[in-house]
Image (cartoon, rainbow, N blue to C red):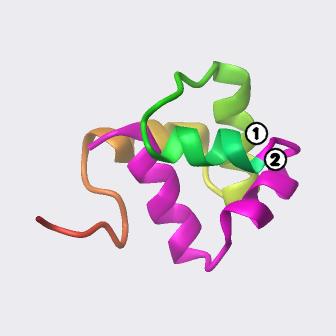
Amino acid sequence: MSFGLAVRAYRDERQLTQEQLADFCDMHVTYISQIERGLKNVSLFNIHRLAYALGVAPSELLVTSHEQAPGARHE
């Protein structure tokens, strides 16, 4: 599972839109969309910003991206 899917799963779990998450992170909504679609590599600084906005430890985003994200669809 990719990092972007983990971000999306946590965002969905918290019922946040991409726009709301972008505002909380002080990032552009297009950047959030690109992260979730796996089009952008995310810096450590931005991983921390995303984790803080989602209320999880940065390690949770990274671990979840290699395991199963909460609320992720099984296909």
User: Most prominent secondary structure in the magenta stretch?
Assistant: helix
Q: What SS does tag 2 mark?
A: helix
Boundaries of the magenta span: 1-28
Check residue 25 in the rendering and tell me which mark sits there, or answer none. 2
**Occupied quadrant, residue 23:** bottom right
The residue lying at 59 percent from left, 38 percent from top is 58
Judge whether residue 33 is colored magenta.
Answer: no
Task: Say which quadrant the C terminus sits in.
Answer: bottom left
Amino acid beneath label 2: Cys
The residue lying at 36 percent from left, 42 percent from top is 65
The residue lying at 74 percent from left, 50 percent from top is 29
Foreground of the two, 40 or 46: 40
Q: What SS does tag 1 mark?
A: helix
The residue lying at 80 percent from left, 43 percent from top is 28
Amino acid beneath label 1: Arg
Whether residue 60 is visible to the viewer of this picture, yes or no, is: no
Judge whether residue 18 is colored magenta.
Answer: yes
Classify mark 2: residues with Cα within 10 Å, few (<14), some (14-19) or many (20+).
many
Q: Does 33 appear above or below 8?
A: above
